[in-house]
Image: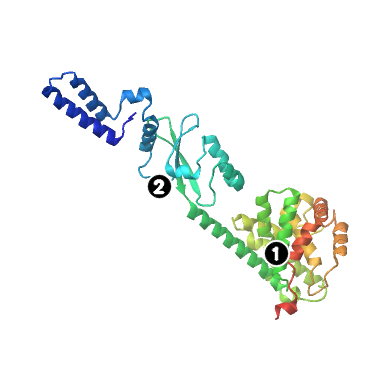
């Protein structure tokens, strides 16, 4: 490995040539080996004496490693040996992960990035909040080193997040359309979404699934877009024929969404199609029983009924909280899954806080 730098080997070549030129003039043949030594080490870029005493060793090692990666590479690069130990990082990589020591530590950091634990990342030396890199591992030919090349994917990540946000917004607005047709407020959709997320977390679903349900639950009544106004907006009780028409909104909603391969819309199809199923099998449209009903639909059913009973609608007044809780208790094991009702009532303050935060604006205030 070379342990001389450009100015050093130029200097050695010049010095060696000068010594060889002076040797005959001064009749000093002993200078000839010295001149040859300087010319040889200058040409090779390597000095055995420097190697013995460790002179320039670290700089030479860095120079060697830099020679293995593309020149002027603007992205982070980490070099690991066969034991997974970090042996080199370029200047950009040093700014991002100054305390990284091994490939195992890098994988640990990747796990924390996935979980979004910024505090832990900071303690590991990861300077979050600036750019996002995708690392590509490649062996370096003729060496025992593996390079982790970083590629800036900040713009791709931002574009992906923007697409997801757009999907969320469109789904939420579509949910509002279904509710608006039946004279519901947009806040009903928001409340059901928040109730569903919190109940999902309480029952033990991962936060990713709870967030997915929050995005999907606003679509539970999307099938109402196909229900005639004469049925949907009837102020009184529906007759048998009208009730059959009304019940079709669950199947219609499922059919509208079921062909999508997007996770949000797949979840929304489940919720739309099953949120009127009942724990004892007496629900519709399929008469599913207990665990046959998807957990997303079982959660949304409680969230929707709790909010519907507490809201004033064209055909009824809002129920007092005491009566709503009594209804949930009566329907436990019949309409609703018992465990979910127990969790809901046990953590009632959480849901009442959501109800207060997203309370409907009185009609007289909206007309001002």
For marks 2 and 1, the one nearer the N-term is 2
The quadrant of the picture occupied by the N terminus is top left
Q: Does residue 255 appear to the left or right of 352 in the view shown?
A: left
Relative to 295, does residue 234 appear above or below in the rendering?
Answer: below
The spot of residue 81 in percent (x, y) is 46, 31
Mark 2, secondary structure of its residue? loop
Disc 2 to disc 1, C-alpha distance = 45 Å
How is the model colour-coded? rainbow
- Who's the residue at 74% across and 79% down the image? 364
In the displayed orientation, state which residue is furthest to the bottom: 368
Q: Which residue is mark 1?
A: 190
Q: Does residue 140 appear to the left or right of 8 in the view shown?
A: right
The spot of residue 323 in percent (x, y) is 88, 64
Relative to 101, does residue 307 appear above or below in the rendering?
Answer: below
Asked whether 244 or 209 is in front, the reply is 209
Relative to 169, does residue 93 appear above or below in the rendering?
Answer: above
- Label tally: 2
- Who's the residue at 14% across and 27% down the image? 21
The quadrant of the picture occupied by the C terminus is bottom right
Q: Which residue is mark 2?
A: 74
């Amino acid at each position: 490995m070379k342990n001389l730098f450009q100015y050093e080997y130029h200097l050695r070549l010049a010095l060696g040539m000068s010594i060889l030129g002076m040797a005959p003039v001064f009749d000093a043949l002993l200078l000839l080996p010295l001149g040859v030594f300087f010319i040889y080490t200058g040409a090779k870029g390597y000095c055995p004496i420097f190697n013995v005493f460790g002179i320039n060793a670290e700089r030479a090692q860095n120079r060697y490693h830099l020679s293995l990666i593309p020149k002027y590479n603007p992205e982070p690069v980490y070099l690991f040996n066969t034991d997974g130990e970090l042996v080199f990082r370029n200047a950009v990589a040093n700014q991002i992960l100054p305390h990284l020591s091994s490939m195992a530590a890098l994988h640990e950091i990747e796990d924390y990035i996935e979980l979004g634990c910024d505090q832990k990342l900071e303690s590991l030396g990861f300077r979050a909040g600036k750019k996002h890199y995708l690392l590509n591992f490649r062996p370096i030919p003729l060496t025992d080193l593996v390079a982790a090349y970083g590629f800036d994917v900040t713009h791709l990540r931002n574009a992906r997040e923007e697409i997801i946000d757009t999907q969320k917004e469109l789904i939420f607005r579509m949910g509002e359309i279904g509710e608006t047709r039946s004279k519901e407020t947009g806040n009903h959709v928001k409340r059901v979404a928040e109730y569903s997320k919190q109940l999902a977390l309480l029952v033990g679903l991962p936060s990713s699934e709870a967030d997915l349900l929050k995005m999907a639950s606003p679509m539970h009544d999307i099938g109402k877009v196909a229900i005639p106004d004469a049925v949907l907006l009837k102020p009184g009780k529906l007759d048998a024929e009208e009730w059959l028409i009304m019940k079709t909104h669950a199947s219609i909603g499922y059919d509208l969404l079921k062909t999508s391969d997007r996770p949000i819309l797949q979840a929304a199809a489940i919720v739309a199609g099953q949120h009127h199923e009942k724990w004892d099998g007496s629900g519709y449209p399929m008469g599913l029983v207990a665990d046959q009903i998807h957990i997303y639909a079982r959660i949304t059913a409680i969230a929707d009924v709790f909010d519907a009973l507490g809201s004033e609608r064209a055909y009824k007044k809002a129920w007092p909280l005491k009566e709503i809780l009594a209804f949930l208790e009566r329907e436990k094991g019949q309409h609703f899954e018992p465990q979910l009702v127990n969790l809901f009532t046990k953590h009632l303050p959480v849901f009442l806080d959501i109800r207060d935060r997203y309370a409907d604006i009185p009609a007289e205030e909206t007309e001002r």
